Amino acid sequence: MTSQIETALSRLQADSVYILLHHGWKKEARSNRWHFATRWAKQLPVVLVSPETAWPGRVTCREDRIGNSRILKVVSNFGPIWGGAPQIQIAQILDDMRRANFSRPILWLYNAGFAEALAALPAVARVHHVTENYFDFPDMSQLYLDRVALATSLADLNVAVSEGCAKPLRSFTSDKKIMIATNGCDFSAYNESEGLDAEIVTLHQNFRRLGVFGGNINDRLDFDLMARAVKTNTETFFLFVGDARMSAEGRAKFSLLCRNPNVGAIGKVSPDRLPAIYRAADFGFIPYIRSRLIVENGFPLKALEMAATGLPVVSTFMKPLAPFSPPLAVAQSDSDFLSGISQARRHPEHEKALRAIAFENNYDIRFSEILEKMAHSEPHTGSRIDVLAATYPHAELKDIATMTRKALLKNAIFYGLRYRFFISATQFVDRLPSPLRKFVIAAKRALVGRSAATQ
């Protein structure tokens, strides 16, 4: 695998990787983005580009969790394609490349808000990594979907985590520029560590079995289905581990579920603690609602992470997970899920099969496969501004340097003033006293939940 990576990198001759992200990187769990960032950082300097400032100049800081990487903050990009914001973004990133003496970067895009940057910036390879099918999202902005389409057409390679995510991309590019690479797991982190989590061992003492869910607790979870599982398995303790953020209706259902004596929640924990939690449990459960968005596209990382510890996994139905059943138990129906919960037990042979499938889908292997595909694609070195100009002739793009100078002269004063003298709603709320801040956040969530319920 090491030789394949070295051969691919030798062919690309890249000197850096710019990963174009959504906002909120610092608070992000160890997701698909995290795993690829850490692996890239072992090969090349990584710049994590996050749209988290209104200042038009250069804002960069260290990323202490990942060696050989740093964070570059740029302005957000909303509104019609090719407005003022993307020109500022491009100027900020170009300035960073110049200061770092990078001339052959790889652009690795997760956020289609950087579609114009993907076109205008120089690169030896452009990868559009698609972890969600945004075309299945209810009420998704058409402006963002237009940028997804643009990014797909610009990319040398579109990497989709499932067939459901790949399907809409085929309207905008050829099959040879689409690759399906499912989510994986950090196998060594989950398989090679030792010991049982002390808190979970204590919780287990009064129950015959203990099942665990590890991940974000939100409106994607089927709390009604879990209520049935809890009531029919009274000798089993059901533990939820993760950050709880949901609508008012979801919070009410989760609160009601947690009133059962065999249900508990311990909140968000360090990712380094999860392997010990899984090893102390008897099975893992993944109870998602049966929406098209999840059934067609869902591939939760937790499924293989649990498997890497030998933990039996019972999941509601998701097409991308189905090929891994068995050894994962991917239920076709609610009754199958409830039956799987009741029967879940650890067995040596089953644990061996679970670890094997987790190993076969290690992120190290995924990284090598994608890099190999990149090296044998037909990258368009330099800028792809011609594609953007052809698609959006009103952009009048001729020379990047002239364009960025014009953008800075035209927009820097506006962005600079906004940064210095105006604060966003989020910044305003963050500065409120704690009780008032909690009230405002609760009110917002209640309004969002009520709005969603009426749609």
Image (cartoon, helix red, strand yellow):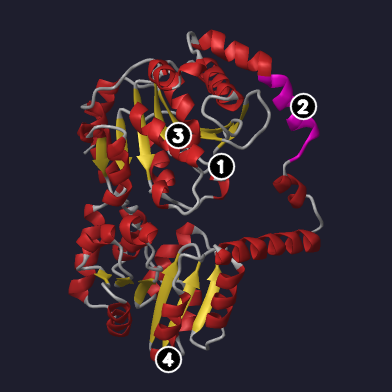
Residue receiving disc 4 = 234
Tell me how far mark 4 sits from mark 1, CA to CA: 42 Å
Q: Which one is earlier in the sequence, the residue at label 4 or at label 1? A: 1
**40 part of magenta stretch:** no
Quarter occupied by the N terminus? top left
Q: CA distance from mark 2 to mark 1?
A: 21 Å
The answer to the question of whether label 4 and label 2 lie on touching residues, with beta carbons closer than 8 A, is: no
> Which residue is rendered at x = 40% and y = 84% of the image?
229
Please identify the quadrant where the C terminus is shown: bottom right
Q: Nearer the viewer, mark 2 or mark 1?
A: 2
Across and down, in percent, residue 269 comes to: 53, 63
Q: Earlier in the sequence, mark 4 or mark 2?
A: 4
Identify the amino acid type marked 4: Thr
Marks 3 and 4, how far apart at CA = 49 Å
Q: Amino acid at mark 1?
A: His
Q: Amino acid at mark 2?
A: Leu
Q: CA distance from mark 4 to mark 2?
A: 60 Å
Q: Is residue 314 above or below residue 299?
A: below
